[in-house]
Amino acid sequence: MRILYFLMFFLSLSFNSILFAQNLFKSFVFQMPMDEAKLILNKDSKILRNLSFGQGTIYAVRKKSLVGRDDKLVSMNLGSKKNLNLEQAGAYMKKSRVYFESKNFKTVYAQENWSNPDLVKKNLPCIRFVDPEKTVVVEVDPRGQGTVYNVFVTFYNYDWFLKKALGK
């Protein structure tokens, strides 16, 4: 009987770790039907409009945050909740980097001037992280000009991202 319980426990852990490996963010799972993702967004909208990736930062998931291909969720793009000025956008970039690195995400790419939105090259990612299990890629990018900026945090499935990057 103990062997049966152990086997059931082991199988449930294996199944849960497979599901965990597919998580993009919160309850959103890579390749889940877009309809299900929209239901989660509606159900948890209050929480998902007030997320922090660093002290003093507030990001929001919006309907356009969910990115799908073939009616399946492939990535999520969260934006700063409010418009920011240049100084605030730079602070968001720095605080977000500290946040992800404190969660053991590894910085795998950063532009030379990653924390200065005016000097970031628009055609390249600003800063990119990978989680310790290599299941999620996170990019943090500023957008804007003059006096109005936003900072975006995008979550991708690691394997999907690599395939796209390699042109597969």
Image (spheres, helix red, strand yellow):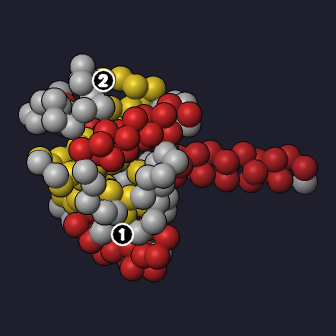
Residue 104, position as x, y percentages in the image: 55, 31
Residue 20, position as x, y percentages in the image: 53, 49
Tag 1's secondary structure?
helix
- Of residues 22 and 142, the one nearer the viewer is 142
Mark toward the start of the polypeptide (1 vs 2): 1
Q: Looking at the figure, which quarter contains the N terminus?
A: bottom right
Q: Is residue 95 above or below residue 16?
A: above
Q: CA distance from mark 1 to mark 2?
A: 29 Å
Residue 8, position as x, y percentages in the image: 74, 53
Which disc is residue 37 wearing? Answer: 1
Q: Residue 96 appears in which quarter of the rendering?
A: top left
- Of residues 145 and 48, the one nearer the viewer is 145
Q: Is residue 79 left or right of residue 20?
A: left
The structure residue drawn at horizontal position 44% and vertical position 52%, both measured from the top left corner, is 57
Number of numbered discs: 2
Amino acid of disc 2: Tyr
Point out the residue furthest to the right here: 1
Q: Is residue 56 left or right of residue 14?
A: left
Which disc is residue 109 wearing? Answer: 2
Tag 2's secondary structure?
strand
Residue 142, position as x, y percentages in the image: 23, 43
- Crowding at label 2, few (<14), some or many (≥20) Cα neighbours within 10 Å? some
Q: Residue 64 appears in which quarter of the rendering?
A: bottom left
- Of residues 100 and 80, the one nearer the viewer is 80
Amino acid of disc 1: Ala
Which disc is residue 166 wearing? Answer: none
